[in-house]
Image: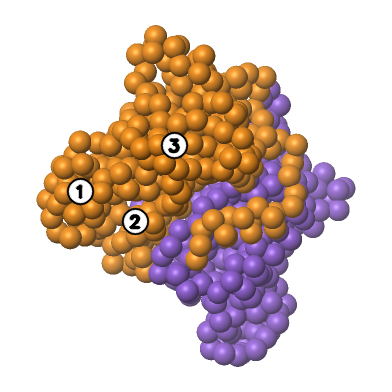
Chain colours: A orange, B purple
Amino acid sequence: VDEQKIIDFVRKSVSFQSPGVIMGIGDDTAVLKYDTRRYLLATTDTLVGDVHYLPDYFTPKQVGIKAIESNVSDIAAMGGVPTYAMISLILPRNTDKGFIQGLYSGIRMCSNKYKISIIGGNVSRGNQVSITTQMMGFVDKKNLCLREDAEIGDLICVTGMLGASKVGLELLKLKKLGKSINAFLNPKSNLQSAKKIAKYANAMEDISDGLATEIKNICKESKTGAKIYKNKIPIKKSAIKDSKILGKDPINFALYGGEDYEIVFTIPKKNVKYLEKRNCKIYILGKILPKKEGIFLMDDGRKTKLGSGYNHL
Amino acid sequence: VDEQKIIDFVRKSVSFQSPGVIMGIGDDTAVLKYDTRRYLLATTDTLVGDVHYLPDYFTPKQVGIKAIESNVSDIAAMGGVPTYAMISLILPRNTDKGFIQGLYSGIRMCSNKYKISIIGGNVSRGNQVSITTQMMGFVDKKNLCLREDAEIGDLICVTGMLGASKVGLELLKLKKLGKSINAFLNPKSNLQSAKKIAKYANAMEDISDGLATEIKNICKESKTGAKIYKNKIPIKKSAIKDSKILGKDPINFALYGGEDYEIVFTIPKKNVKYLEKRNCKIYILGKILPKKEGIFLMDDGRKTKLGSGYNHL
């Protein structure tokens, strides 16, 4: 099962598009007509036990929080704010009552924080726990940032330091300790920065599948190339420290790790000053190029290939 | 895992409701503000392999069709029409390419039929196939029919003959043949009738969990009782015939079987003539009563208890 191949297949095989659809398959979040000022956003994300979270390490409450945060992150990456959510659970017959209570205490706490209404859902029986969250939100039309909106010459930036989440996962798998574990267990979307950036950015994505993959997605949809300066990629201190325990280079976690839920965006150089004025911390790490120049990493003046995703580690 | 208990728990534990929510948890479908004329509807439903469909008997295309039809049925039961859908798949690592292609040929065929745009989704790895469909649609405000809208004195009606789907499932499980199997493998929502009825009905529900359960849901939310005439319940011919093979009383399948996807609704007596004029076939089978009279079945002049759901068979 190669997710990207399946999505490409679905995209080709789906034929009918109603006039209400501004952006369907092709971004993390669908964009739909709403009123004169706003678009309606809709996204969905699934957590599968043992795949997307580790039942031995996550409390049920943390699972509930992750279910909400990962979807908020997708809405934020469009320049929008979340409003409604539906939760579809698959639960084994012997599921502990405490699991469901803990899960919903996380869902409730996190959705209240963002003023998201839980408007419905579904409970099904199955042999493995999964939580599919569907979230809706709104975006001012002038703030909408699509993957396909990057322009040649834009600076490529991120909103925070990367790598800790996947370092934390590796530590857990090896039963080792380190501060990075906290980043993996308690993911947090960066809605506040995304809201500030949306007015000034062109393309935006949240870093759920790794920085390299997200930049490649932006380039694919925008039909551009990109240059990334390896030494400009901000790596979280805990990721650097804990990578030593793993005997691995932390840059690979920052580039390919994913689930950091920071925002990567492209912005015209002239707009950067507005973000500085608004105290929005950003890290500039590359530039959008014409498509024919390709997508590559600059490492001490040498061009190198940009790998793709966590599999690359 | 008792679905109703979990839903009741979720309903109590979810606290924040935004002003955009007309109806949240408590109906099959959420109702949200849209424009001056219409509400936005949102529903979700999950099919789990071996639970909601039997991989040995359903073709992948039939699974795709069922995923769409069951959600269309929920939108229809609000008096609305479906517009957008998102599909979230969980697939085991070894999933056959043919399964995905077949599934999407069903999803595509069925969504094109209803002019539904597939606007997004998600693919995750897991150890059991599941398909979670989230569907949106619109309803004219004046046509909205909620569970809670039944009025004392309303007639209780259904749009078609019942029982065949669950008889078909029982036949399949016993490896016996019969026409009812077709009803189980090829569920079809009754959007056409629902559209005609919505203008004149008070409460509406689609019969996914069985006639008795749906009527109880309507009574619970409308705070009423109900009287059902056992001999007025329309049973499909194939269900009657195939029940003999099973050695069971077909009325139990019609009352408790579910997945027939016809519509049960309550309507003021004076409005029935409008449905007749519009050639909308309906079966009148009971009456909404004050809550204190309870919910019961009339069997040859004797009051009997109304069971609940498929478990009752």
Extreme residue toward the front, this view: A301
**Circle 2 sits in a helix, a strand or a loop, which is it?**
loop
Q: CA distance from mark 2 to mark 1?
A: 12 Å
Q: CA distance from mark 1 to mark 3?
A: 22 Å
Q: Is residue B66 above or below residue A144?
A: below
User: Do the CB atoms of the residues marked 2 and 3 lie less than 8 Å apart?
Assistant: no
Of badges 2 and 3, nearer the viewer stands: 3
Q: Which residue is mark 3?
A: A228
Q: Which residue is mark 1?
A: A243
The residue that appears at 31% across and 61% down in the rendered structure is A50
Q: Which residue is mark 2?
A: A313
Chain letter for mark 3, please.
A
User: Do the CB atoms of the residues marked 2 and 1 lie less than 8 Å apart?
Assistant: no
Extreme residue toward the top, this view: A277
Q: Amino acid under label 3? A: Ile
Q: Position of residue A201 (x, y in %)?
A: 52, 23
**Circle 1 sits in a helix, a strand or a loop, which is it?**
helix
Is there one chain holding both mark 2 and mark 3? yes
